[in-house]
C-alpha cells in the first residue's frame, strides 16, 4: 500500500464525518457565502482550531473574490492546509549524523507511546539501522514487559534494569552501551506521566541532563506522542511537555480512530513543532513519516 493510500484510509473517519461531505459542494462550481459558512463549521468540527480556520476561510474568500466565484477552492484549501503544517521543517534530514542517534520518547499514559517506540524501531530497522531500546519507565513492570515484546518484533536490542531503578541511570547506561557497540539508534522510553505531575515532568529534564554528561548533543530528538482522539487536550499536553523537556517533534497516534484528525493543524501552528510520524493502526507497519501535502490531499479526498 502506498503512503497516500495509508493517509486516505487513516483519515477516513475525519473525512467522512466532516470535510469529505463538502467535497462535492466545493467542486460543484459556484461557491457562495453559505458554502463558506458550512466549510468553516466542518473545519472546526475536524478540530483544526479557530485561529487556523479563520485564516483559511479569509484566504479562500479573498481568492474567490479575485478569481470569481468559480475559482479553485479545493486547490486553495489544500495549499493552505499544507502551508499551515510546514511551520517548522522535520529533523529527519539530520538523523544519524552521529552514532548513536538518541531519541527520547515522552507522552501520557494511554497515548500509544510504548507501541510507537516499537514501531519506530521497526521503521528504522527496515532502513538497516542497528537499534537499541532502553526501558526507562522503571515504575511499571508491565510497561517494560510490553516494550520488550515490541523490541523482539522490531529486531532491536533491549536494555532494562530492576523495577524502581533511576530512569536517568538507565538512560545513561544505555547510551554508554550503544556507543560501545557502535549501534545507530537509541530509543529511550520514559514513564507515561500526566502533564500535571510536576515532579515527574522534571524527571524528563533530569534524563536529558544526565545524557549530556556523555554527549552534550544528546538527546538529539525528544518526540512527544499524542493520541489524536484526545483532541484539544493533546494541544495542552504538548504545551506542558514542551515547557519542560524541550520537545523537538511530535508523533500523532490513532488518527484512524477519530473524526477530529484536524488536530494536527493547531498543534503545528500554535507550538511551531513538526509532526515527524503519524499512526493509523495497531500493526507494526502502521506508523508513517508525516507528509503535509499527502495529509491535506487525503483529508479533502472524495
Image (cartoon, rainbow, N blue to C red):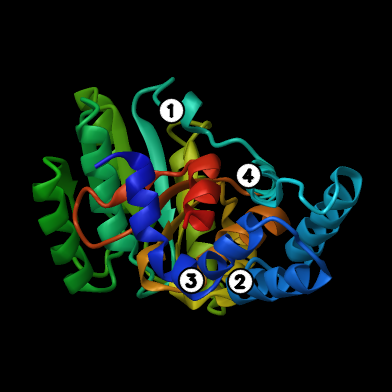
Crowd around label 1: few <14 · some 14–19 · many ≥20 (10 Å): some
Residues under labels 4 and 3: Cα distance? 35 Å
Residues under labels 1 and 3: Cα distance? 28 Å
Q: Quadrant of residue 89?
A: top right
Tell me the tag on residue 164: none
Nearest to N terminus: mark 1 or mark 4: 4
Q: Which residue matches tag 1?
A: 95
Nearest to N terminus: mark 1 or mark 2: 2
Q: Are marks 4 and 2 in contact (CB under 8 Å)?
A: no
Nearest to N terminus: mark 1 or mark 3: 1
Nearest to N terminus: mark 2 or mark 3: 2
In-front residue for pair 113/138: 113
Q: Which residue matches tag 4?
A: 82
Q: Are marks 4 and 3 in contact (CB under 8 Å)?
A: no
The residue lying at 63 percent from left, 58 percent from top is 28
Q: Position of residue 261 (x, y in %)?
A: 50, 65
Disc tally is 4
In this rendering, the answer to whether 31 lies above or below 33 is above
Secondary structure state at the residue bearing disc 1:
loop
Residues under labels 4 and 2: Cα distance? 16 Å
Q: Position of residue 256 (x, y in %)?
A: 36, 65
Is residue 279 shown to the viewer in this render? no
Q: Which residue matches tag 2?
A: 47
Judged by depth in the image, the label closer to the viewer, 1 or 3, is: 1
Is residue 14 shown to the viewer in this render? yes
Crowd around label 2: few <14 · some 14–19 · many ≥20 (10 Å): many
Left or right: 207, with 195 as reference point: left
Judged by depth in the image, the label closer to the viewer, 2 or 3, is: 2
Amino acid at each position: 500500500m502506498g503512503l497516500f493510500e495509508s493517509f486516505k484510509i487513516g483519515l477516513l473517519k475525519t473525512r467522512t464525518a466532516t470535510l469529505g461531505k463538502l467535497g462535492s459542494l466545493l467542486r460543484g462550481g459556484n461557491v457562495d457565502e453559505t458554502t463558506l459558512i458550512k466549510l468553516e463549521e466542518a473545519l472546526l468540527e475536524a478540530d483544526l482550531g479557530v485561529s487556523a480556520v479563520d485564516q483559511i476561510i479569509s484566504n479562500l474568500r479573498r481568492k474567490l473574490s479575485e478569481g470569481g466565484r468559480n475559482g479553485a477552492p479545493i486547490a486553495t484549501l489544500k495549499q493552505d492546509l499544507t502551508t499551515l503544517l510546514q511551520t517548522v521543517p522535520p529533523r529527519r534530514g539530520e538523523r544519524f549524523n552521529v552514532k548513536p542517534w538518541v531519541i527520547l520518547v515522552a507522552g501520557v499514559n494511554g497515548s500509544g507511546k510504548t507501541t510507537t517506540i516499537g514501531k519506530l524501531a521497526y521503521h528504522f530497522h527496515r532502513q538497516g539501522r542497528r537499534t537499541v531500546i532502553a526501558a526507562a519507565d522503571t515504575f511499571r513492570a508491565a510497561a517494560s514487559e510490553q516494550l520488550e515484546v515490541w523490541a523482539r518484533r522490531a529486531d532491536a536490542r533491549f536494555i532494562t534494569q530492576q523495577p524502581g531503578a533511576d530512569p536517568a541511570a538507565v538512560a545513561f547506561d544505555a547510551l554508554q552501551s550503544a556507543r560501545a557497540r557502535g549501534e545507530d539508534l537509541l530509543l529511550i522510553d520514559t514513564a507515561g506521566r500526566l502533564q500535571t505531575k510536576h515532579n515527574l515532568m522534571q524527571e524528563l529534564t533530569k534524563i536529558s541532563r544526565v545524557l549530556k554528561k556523555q554527549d552534550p548533543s544528546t538527546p538529539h530528538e525528544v518526540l512527544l506522542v499524542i493520541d489524536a482522539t484526545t483532541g484539544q487536550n493533546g494541544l495542552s499536553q504538548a504545551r506542558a511537555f514542551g515547557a519542560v523537556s524541550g520537545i523537538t517533534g511530535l508523533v500523532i497516534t490513532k488518527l484512524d480512530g477519530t473524526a477530529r484528525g484536524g488536530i494536527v493543524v493547531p498543534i503545528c501552528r500554535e507550538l511551531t513543532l513538526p509532526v515527524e510520524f503519524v499512526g493509523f493502526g495497531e500493526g507494526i507497519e502502521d506508523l508513517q513519516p508525516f507528509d503535509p501535502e499527502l495529509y491535506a490531499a487525503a483529508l479533502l479526498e472524495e
